Image (cartoon, rainbow, N blue to C red):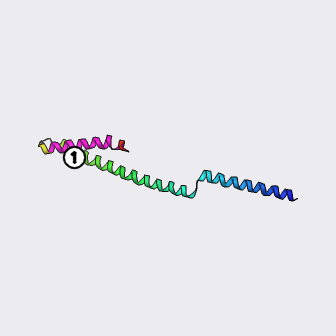
């Protein structure tokens, strides 16, 4: 009878240890879960700011180019410089900014 109880205790001990180990391996520790959640929040904030910069830059510069496109009479040196800066800024935002990350 005593051997049966001891075998049962050994089985329960081995089973519970395996289950806890399996749970920790699949779920991770609480600290790891907190770090993962924090990194998700940081990534969301980063991508939101990144997206706002791109959208704002593209919209503003495209509107600037559109104004110059519709008003063909604008030909001063300053106007050409502003147009050149807007076109260059569009290219930097579209090609250079995403590649920097």
Q: Say whether residue 3 is magenta.
A: no
50 lies left or right of 6: left
Q: Which residues are magenta?
A: 79-98
Q: Is residue 65 visible?
A: no
In the picture, residue 2 is in which quadrant?
bottom right
Indicate the position of residue 97 as horizontal and vertical percent values: 33, 44
- In the image, 35 versus 58, the foreground residue is 35
Q: Main secondary structure of the magenta part?
A: helix
20 lies left or right of 9: left
State the count of labels: 1
Q: Work out whether 11 lies above or below 91.
A: below
Indicate the position of residue 92 as horizontal and vertical percent values: 29, 42
Q: Say whether residue 97 is magenta.
A: yes
Indicate the position of residue 34 as horizontal and vertical percent values: 52, 58
Q: Residue at x 71, y 56 (%)?
A: 16
Where is the C terminus found, in terms of image quarters?
A: top left
In the picture, residue 85 is in which quadrant?
top left
Indicate the position of residue 94 as horizontal and vertical percent values: 32, 42
- In the image, 4 versus 78, the foreground residue is 4
Q: Residue at x 30, y 50 (%)?
A: 56
- In the image, 20 versus 72, the foreground residue is 20
Find numbered disc 1 in the image and state the secondary structure of the residue it sits on.
helix
Query: Are there few (<14), some (14-19), or many (20+) residues within 10 Å of tag 1?
Result: some
Where is the N terminus found, in terms of image quarters?
A: bottom right
Q: Is residue 77 visible?
A: yes
Q: Residue at x 78, y 55 (%)?
A: 10
Residue furthest to the right = 1
Residue receiving disc 1: 64
């Amino acid at each position: 009878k005593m051997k049966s109880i001891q075998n049962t205790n050994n089985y329960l001990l081995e089973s519970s240890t395996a289950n806890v180990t399996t749970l920790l391996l699949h779920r991770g520790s609480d600290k790891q879960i907190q770090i993962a959640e924090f990194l998700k929040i940081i990534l969301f904030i980063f991508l939101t700011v990144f997206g706002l910069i791109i959208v704002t830059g593209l919209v503003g510069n495209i509107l600037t180019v559109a104004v110059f496109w519709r008003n063909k009479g604008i030909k001063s040196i300053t106007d050409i410089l502003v147009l050149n800066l807007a076109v260059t800024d569009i290219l930097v935002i579209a090609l250079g900014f995403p590649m920097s990350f």
